[in-house]
Image: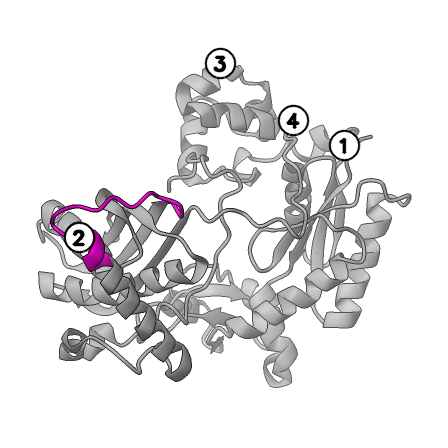
Amino acid sequence: MERTILHIDCNKFYASVECLHRPEIRNKPVVVGGSEKSRHGIVLTKNEIAAKYGIKTAEPLWQARNKCSDLVVVPPNFPLYVRFSNMAKNIYKDYSDYIEPFGLDENWVDVTGDQRTGYAIAEEIRERVKEELGITVSIGVSWNKIFAKFGSDYKKPDAVTVIDRENYKDIVWKSPCSDLLFVGPATTKKLNSYGIYTVGDLAAADKGFLKSVFGKNGEILYSFSNGLDTTPVRHIDDVQAVKSVGNSTTTPRDMVNNSDVKTVFTVLGESVARRMREIGVKGKTITIILRDKNLYHFTRQGQLQAHSDVSSEIIHMAMKLFLENYDWKNPLRSIGIAVSDFDVDEAVQFDFSKSVEKREKLERLEKAVDDVRRRFGSYSIQRASLLADTGLSRFDPHDDHTIHPIGYFKEFKGNKE
């Protein structure tokens, strides 16, 4: 039996929810944007009216205001968006138990086996979301996840597009290859340099050639463009194994010395360690992510001697990696820490330096601090060193942490823009 897969995309999600809750801005150009004071001042999403001014997602707010002097900028309200996302999923649950999120506003839904057509189901969902939630969705219907996603992007807003065996060559293959999932600007530029401009060009390319240029990702591109993707839609109860835990931040001012970096790494390291303890994992590989004021970025990795969830060990390794790899040619704009290589059942080996006993004592101390922060807030107990520069240290990556969509394929690296 051929699969019937829907990809449901909530149109201009954040802005649509804000306009629903604020009738006074409903007929104005609206964007949801980050904090300009904290240098997170970019457009997260915009409504249809703002889109007519040429405002784009991820552009700086000052540029958006230059395009539209009457622009209304509202701060993001993620708890509200999560609530709407869950309400939308509750509607989808009436049609299938196979629902896989791709961020807060997008979901694949496998309705294979339903006696109705995919189009009929999609139309019913589209009308229900509009009537019950007050926002609109665009839905793609196809036999695989990639073409279903293509369909939801093909016609917006408030539309259903069916991509089947009869029409995919007219719809998908005639479109630019950049319209295909995970083909970003750098990949597009490289494909174009080889005379590959459309999805059809990509589908007709020699698989061996694509592999020679892009490695394993070339095979994935070939599969995607030819509609050969067979990846299943996960069951709603399936929980993906956590592969890494990390936090990063853009600081209110540039970091200009090692002391600045250590202050921010301390806040980030404590948050990462606390989140690891909450899910019961310990990690060994520490990754730091650095971005300077010119937006050049790079990462470095190192390994702890043993798996750990102790913040001081994570922070120490992060600083070690930083001091060994950064020369301060430019001030830093943002930094991050991630921990991976988890092992929850590692055998404990005692040594004469008593490092294990020290780690266990620190673990007990940090768990006690966790309890205090759970009851009284993240700022209720802090390291004295963080009080020296509250301008840099006064942020809460633990409670403000937002989960973003994980890559469709963990190993997909063709989109390294």
- Residue nearer the viewer, 165 or 290: 290
Q: What residue is disc 1 on?
A: 167
The residue wearing badge 3 is: 208
Residue at the image position 43 percent from the left and 40 percent from the top: 185
**Any magenta on residue 3?**
no
Q: Nearer the viewer, residue 411 or 126?
A: 411
- How far apart marks 1 and 4 lie (CA) works out to 15 Å
Q: CA distance from mark 4 to mark 3?
A: 16 Å
Measuring from the top left, give residue 328's x and y in whole percent: 9, 53
Q: CA distance from mark 2 to mark 1?
A: 64 Å
Kind of residue sitting beneath label 2: Ser
The quadrant the C terminus occupies is top left
In the image, residue 216 lies at what x, y percent?
45, 24
Disc 3 and disc 1 in contact, CB within 8 angstroms = no
Could you tell whether 410 is left or right of 286 in the image? right
Q: Which is in the foreground here, disc 2 or disc 1? A: 2
Quarter-wise, where is residue 366 in the image? bottom left
Query: Of label 1 and label 4, which has the lower sequence position?
Result: 1
Residue neighbourhood size for the residue with mark 3, other residues' Cα within 10 Å, grouped as few (<14), some (14–19), many (≥20): few
Where is mark 2, residue-wise? Answer: 355
Residue 15 visible in the snapshot: no
Q: Quadrant of residue 2?
A: top right
Instruction: Tell me which amino acid carries mark 3.
Output: Gly
Mark 4 element type: loop
Q: Residue flagged by tag 1: what amino acid is it?
A: Asn
> Which span of residues is magenta-colored?
342-359
At 77% from the left and 59% from the top, the residue drawn is 126
Position of residue 47 in the picture relative to residue 212 (left or right): right
Front disc: 3 or 1: 3
User: What x and y, as percent, mark residue 273?
Assistant: 32, 60
Quadrant occupied by the N terminus? top right
Q: Determine the CA span between mark 3 and mark 1.
A: 27 Å
